[in-house]
Amino acid sequence: MSNASETVTSLSSETRTGVIGVHGVTKRFPGVIAVNNVSLTFHQGEVHVLLGENGAGKSTLVGILSGLQEPDDGYLSLNGKKIRLASPSASLDAGISTVFQHSMLVPTLTVLENLTLGAPWYERPPRARIAARMEELKREFALSLPLDAIVGELSLGQQQQIEIARALLRDSKVLILDEATSMLTPQGAHELGERMQKLVKSGLAVIFITHKLAEAYRYGNRISVLKQGALAGEMGPDQLKSMSEDQAVDEIVRLMFGREAGAGSTEQRNSTKRDDTVLKLENLSTQGDADVMGIADISLILQAGEIVGVAGIDGNGQKQLAEAMAGQRPLNSGRVELDGEDITSATVAQRRRKGLRYLTDDRLAEGSVAAFPISENTVLKDIGQPPFWVNGLERPQRIAQHARDLIARFSVHAPGETTPIGRLSGGNIQKVLLGRELLGEARVVVFNKPTYGLDLKNIDTSRQRISEIAERGLAVLLISTDLDELMALSDRIAVMEGGRIRGIVKNDGSGEALRLRIGRMMAGEEDYKQATA
Amino acid sequence: MTIQDDMNPVSADAETNSDGIARTVAERSAFQRVLTLTVGPILAAFLLSALILMLVGVNPLTYYGYILERSLFSGLGLQQTATRMAPLLFLCASLIIAFRAGIWNLGTDGQFLLGAVISAASAPLLVGVLPGWAVLLAGFVLAALVGAVWSLIPALLKAYQGVNEIITTLMMSFLGVLLASTLVKLVFRDPATTVPQTRTLPVEDRLPRLFDTSISSGLIWGLIAVLAVHLMMTRTAFGLRLRMVGANPLAATHAGLSVPLLTLATFGLSAGFAGLAGASEILGVAGNVRANWNPAYGLMVIPLVFLARFNGVGAIVLVFFYSALMIGSESAARRLGVPQDFTLVLVASLLICLGLGEYIDHHKRKKER
Amino acid sequence: MSGLLTEAFLSSLLTGAIVAAIPILLAGLGEQMSEKAGVLNIGIEGMMLMGAYIGFLVAFETNSLWLGFLGGILGGVLTAIVMAVLCVRLGLNQIVIGIGLTLGVEGLTALLHHFQFSRTYPRLPAPERLSIPGLTDLPVIGPSLFGRHLIVYLALIAVVVLAYLYRRTNLGMTLSAAGERPAALDVAGGNVLGIRVVAVLFTGAMAGLGGAYLANIGAGLFIPFMTGGAGFIGIVLAMLARGRPLWVLIGSLIFGAALSLTTALQVAGSNIPTDVIQMLPFAAVMLVLVLFGRRAKLPAALGAAYERGAR
């Protein structure tokens, strides 16, 4: 299984000091150059941050280092020796462990089994040895894991700890953490930062991939900025130490976008809230089960022109709330009122026609049918409705025309309306879906993580659009895991944890204090000083 | 791509769509593509089968020549081929609905036989009671209903419990085949015959023949069924709903479609057409059902529908060639002593070779991009 | 019907149950490993039939049942190799290829059998049996439980061995990982395609052995199409057993009993048509699926080909 072929070649003395060297690596995919002639050195004892937007080439670089992909040009080196990582096992043998952005654990297996995954099949799991090692890890790195628990039942934070523990059990020399904070509370992210410092002190090299600027400065010893597949700049430890956080962030922004800071959308928007209530939720509850969290007693009022944010760690009932509002998820109890009309028993299609729209977070798996052309995807929520269908018969020209209009109006980059939507980038799919939701007379739009996974330009445009929608007098429910986004856009922020609203706070611009308060509620503390709307 | 891809039958759609996009890239190698995708695999399959024939001591040229001569180049053979197409076409209609809607209905054999038995049991009794056309209509309607009913348990289990339909339809198929045989022996047995079989529909009461030939007009109905189903699945709101459930049930729920109800509809329609296939064989050709009769067309048609990429017109073409193969090999079994089971070998090697062809093509295109 | 409870009836029922259960048990155990690893092995029916054909042929030519069993394993594995190459290595659709393989083997074995034996179906001599003094002489259960061919006991031992391997070694978890999240196994340094190929070949071996048992011990002869859905029942057993070999054993005994009722009732001179009795095992499967179908949880990646880096 191990095919890490090593050949001794004379390399520059500079690379010899590093653990891993990336030398002029280029990787092409159909239509794009994902990584373009990148050279990097990762050193022992350093948290090396790879920073960049979506599509900057971070994930491809992770893929190359973890043996999932091989570079088209260039090569890798380990301790000064040229090395080929043709498979994940070659990468592991070379001492490189990766914690991927999306959990790479088997949810149906126990923690112990996941820790031993990849071992030869005929061996018995070395339980005693692992238990002993886990005790050490607990002391050294505060990693505490129940060995016999089923992984699928653990929190995402714990799952991440399993993956880190697995890397340590393998005596890895290099640990790659890909977007490791996206599933964590602010506090959890902080703990991870401290853990990374402990790890590098014990002699590892940590490669930390993120798109969040502040994290890069706080947790990193060295920062490399990637931009459109190429290395845009690097900041060494000495340089970083001499800078304040603001200075560093300014510098990073300059490297990433070639413009000064402040262009980020952290500025709070002006409220456009009006007095008339549009949507009223009373005590919504849904059934939960082993896989899906139920929601309980959710009451919320949305006013015209208002943006209500919903904060919370992913998977705490936000999606179920959105689905219950859209009519996609049956209610155990509760009442939904739109413009004073009881729509509790209305179907998805009826709610949609009355102006209640839901933009899902799962663009590919739920929002669209990847194999269908863009044109069909623009009308998927109106199948059978005129003017696209007459007496149940499709009017292909009308649908195509509608799709072309939508493509033009929302500046979707697509070869044409017959292109399967699965071939578009995330940002462009998002535009199509948004266009679909805004068709006709919309009154309320529920956005579920609308900017997740988009690049910075598209994030800006999307946030702009959400603001405009509220300005037009529509009510907006904005579900997001990005607190900055919520604090920039919302009038009020509701915090969900365990399927309940733990508190609703007014977005009064109090910055860090508010952030802390929300963070505590995200961790499950009730907010007794609940602000009245 | 048809054979390549995951479990979901609809994923084939994805590839046909993307074919259109990749066209510009692939144009210069269009000839090579045809070679790897169709001509090559077909030749390879016939060669492979020829080897097997040589192994058992039969001259493949003689055999293939005989089949061609018997099924396509003789008037009678051609008529038999056309007649044989009718039930296969109805089965294609059945499977196109199911596969495009993402349902693996592997139980068409049972649905087919029960449809056949009910039409064989009812039609002869209705002769004289109802006008001729109404007898046939009643036979077809009953067959469709019985076929649909036989898919009810798998349908409900799939729609509301998420039980994998591959297994349930297969089990119901075995049950259906045995039940059909039991019904013939115990319930619908013609008291006038010694061999257990149903009453026989007189030749003059069967589906009319086409012009002066021996071709059953079931062929026309079968063609209509396949084309109607093809148009329904590609051109109507209902068809799009079914395809959406098949392609992405989550997206269908999100768009407000009732996935369970549409799943039930898919099963009902698909099994109904399988029932019609049985009726077309009885009311058009056989006139009665003998005990233990089971042509087992159902599983056989699955590869054909797949090779046609769920396209109605493609399915018609393939059914024509397959019918010719069947007629020819049935005759060859009598004259050359090669059992007609050999067609199974031929179709299986065709399937495998075409699958390999698609795989090679897929990887070639990947490299080109 | 008074003859129903005679010793001959019960004895033949029990004997029949075991004889009928063994092929399904072997098929079910084999399929179980494929399904755990994420391969829905619909071709198992073809593997069984090939095992029956080659198993019979070898036993007939060599006069050795044991060589026959080896031949059966070989036949099953040969068929499984096609499946492993096409569906695991090349990622072609498992269901279509599975059906194709089954049809192909049906045709091929019928063809070859026809050219060797024309329309005759030669029989093998009755198999030698284990005889445990004392136990074998017990009434009713003696001959049926303790007087069987050694292979029966080997099949039972296979249940225990597999249960042990699944629970106590990394095998079970490696298979589950390949079936639930192949990407996770891959990045952990495991070999997804490797373990899947092994699982499919094991299925072939077990199904082939089951087929050989069916032909050489069960029937004593080979008839084209003789498996008649036994492989498919193996698939159902594997699905319902949720990864536990012992449950496959229990299930196979129940189905074996239902199957053997046919012969037992004939021995008893009952006039119920055989079709009705043959429906029993399938009806039982449907009943179980209606009652417990929801719980037949299948691996998440079952039926999906794995390609590194594809999402």
Image (spheres, coloured by chain):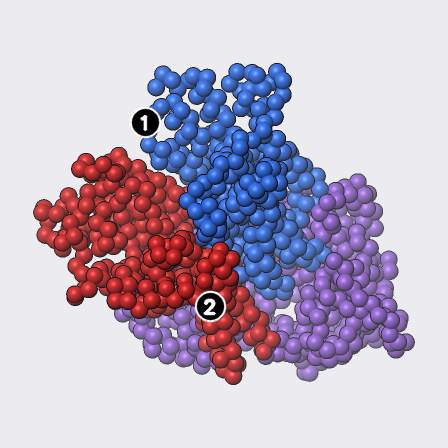
- The residue tagged 1 is C271
Q: Is residue A309 visible?
A: no
Disc 1 is attached to a residue of which chain?
Answer: C
Q: In the rendered picture, chain B carries what hue?
A: red
| Residue B42: assigned label | 2
Instruction: Point out the image quarter for the N terminus of chain C.
Output: top left
Residue neighbourhood size for the residue with mark 1, other residues' Cα within 10 Å, grouped as few (<14), some (14–19), many (≥20): few
Q: Which of C63/C67 is in front?
A: C63
Residue C254 against residue A91 in the figure, above or below: above
Q: Is residue B273 visible?
A: yes
Classify mark 1: helix, strand or loop. Answer: loop
Q: CA distance from mark 2 to mark 1?
A: 50 Å
Disc 2 is attached to a residue of which chain?
Answer: B
Residue B56 location, x and y as percent? Answer: 49, 55
Q: Amino acid at mark 2?
A: Ile
Residue A230 against residue B341 in the figure, above or below: below
Instruction: Give the side of residue C279 with respect to residue C57, left or right.
Output: left
Q: In the rendered picture, chain C carries what hue?
A: blue
Residue drawn 82% across and 55% down?
A171
Classify mark 2: helix, strand or loop. Answer: helix
Residue drawn 60% across and 47% down?
C74
Chain with colour purple in the figure: A
Q: Amino acid at mark 1?
A: Asn
The image quarter containing residue C149 is: top right
